[in-house]
Amino acid sequence: MAKYQDRLFPKTPIIYTGMDRRTLPPDGFQKNATFVGEDFKLTDLVEDILQLAPETTNIVVVLGASPFERYWTAEFRRAFEPFTHRVSFTWVNDLSFEQLLERAATLPPRSFILLALLIRDTAGVTHNENDALQRLHAVANAPINGLYQHRARARGPPRAENNLGGGATFHIVLPAFLGEETMVRQRPV
């Protein structure tokens, strides 16, 4: 949208929502745009796991194989680097979902599964998050935590919650579209 805004909708404002600030285009705010979203503090995910299960020595990070998930794999690796002296990380974005299920059933003791993002596996299969979670939970021999509130309710409370859904975004930005002065506040996640 931002790439063709000048040609298609030169006077239409853009609202970036439902995303992390890191995924915005570099020039996203140069013209009539605003951001209503969150900056996920990825290190909190590891801190939560270590608080829930201090004896954890291995965290299995589940990310899919789509380009979007590859982007997040790099971000997670960078964010988790400070913890590598305390725990090892097993990255499973190079497996099919069936291979992931086999591995989840035979994890070493003191492992913990972090279901970060699973859209498409390396076999090119697209997955429904809820079904994938249920299947993973049925075979895993380790606790599971996830990035969002609606994920990984099977075991462990997630910290990062995206509460700015479409309705909340609408109420935040509607006054701006009506020409009213607004102040959008950011809150840490």
Image (spheres, rainbow, N blue to C red):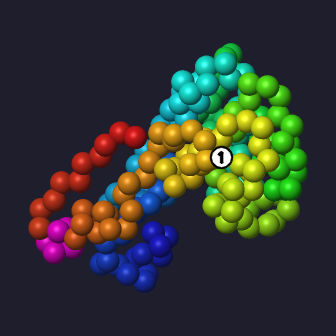
Q: Residue furthest front?
A: 138
Residue toward you, 171 or 50: 50
Q: From which residue to which does the magenta span run?
A: 175-179
Q: Which residue is mark 1?
A: 115
**Whole-percent x and y of residue 94?**
83, 49
Residue occupying image coordinates x 30% and y 63%: 168
How many callouts does the rendering have? Answer: 1
Quadrant where the image shows the C terminus:
top left
**Whole-percent x and y of residue 64?**
72, 54
- Left or right, 104 with reference to 47: right
Q: Is residue 54 visible?
A: yes
Residue occupying image coordinates x 45% and y 69%: 2
**Whole-percent x and y of residue 167?**
32, 68
Q: Is residue 31 visible?
A: no
Q: Residue furthest top?
A: 85
**Location of residue 179 with respect to 52 vertically, above or below:** below
Quadrant of the image occupied by residue 180: bottom left
- Left or right, 179 with reference to 92: left
Residue occupying image coordinates x 88% and y 51%: 99
Residue toward you, 163 or 41: 163
Q: Residue furthest left?
A: 180
* SS at mark 1 in the image: strand
Q: Is residue 98 magenta?
A: no
Magenta segment main secondary structure: helix
Q: Is residue 178 magenta?
A: yes
Crowding at mark 1 (Cα within 10 Å: few <14, some 14-19, many 20+): many
What's the amino acid at mark 1? Answer: Leu
Residue occupying image coordinates x 86% and y 37%: 106
**Whole-percent x and y of residue 41?**
48, 37
